[in-house]
Image: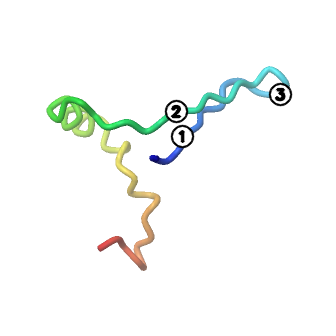
Amino acid sequence: MGERIYNLVGDGESATLNEFQEEPFDDEDALQELIAHHPELLAGEQMNPEDPPR
């Protein structure tokens, strides 16, 4: 099971919490193009520079 991602829409009593499920990407070329146009999608800020993944 992948990580869960949530999106909070609105505020107060009318707020809605949407849950998204992680799924594999079907088209590698489309994924590469998406990342090229939106590099902020990569999880760089979640990494600890003092202890990077190996």
Q: Position of residue 28 (x, y in %)?
A: 17, 35
Q: Is residue 41 above or below residue 26?
A: below
Q: Position of residue 27 (x, y in %)?
A: 19, 30
Residue 21's disc is none
Residue 12's disc is 3
Q: Nearer the viewer, mark 1 or mark 3?
A: 1
Residue at the bottom extreme? 50
**Amino acid type, residue under disc 2 in the picture:** Phe
Residue 20's disc is 2
Going from the N terminus, do you reach mark 1 or mark 2 first?
1
Residues under numbered marks 3 and 2 in contact, where contact means CB atoms less than 8 Å apart: no
**Amino acid type, residue under disc 1 in the picture:** Ile
Badge 1: how crowded within 10 Å, few (<14), some, or many (20+)? few
Q: Position of residue 39 (x, y in %)?
A: 30, 43
| Residue drawn where x is 38% and y is 36% of the image | 23
Is disc 3 placed on a helix, strand or loop? helix
Q: Nearer the viewer, mark 3 or mark 2?
A: 2
Q: Which quarter of the figure has residue 14?
A: top right
Residue 5's disc is 1
**Amino acid type, residue under disc 3 in the picture:** Gly
Going from the N terminus, do you reach mark 3 or mark 2 first?
3
Q: Is residue 25 above or below residue 39?
A: above
12 relative position to 26: left or right = right
Q: Position of residue 6 (x, y in %)?
A: 59, 37
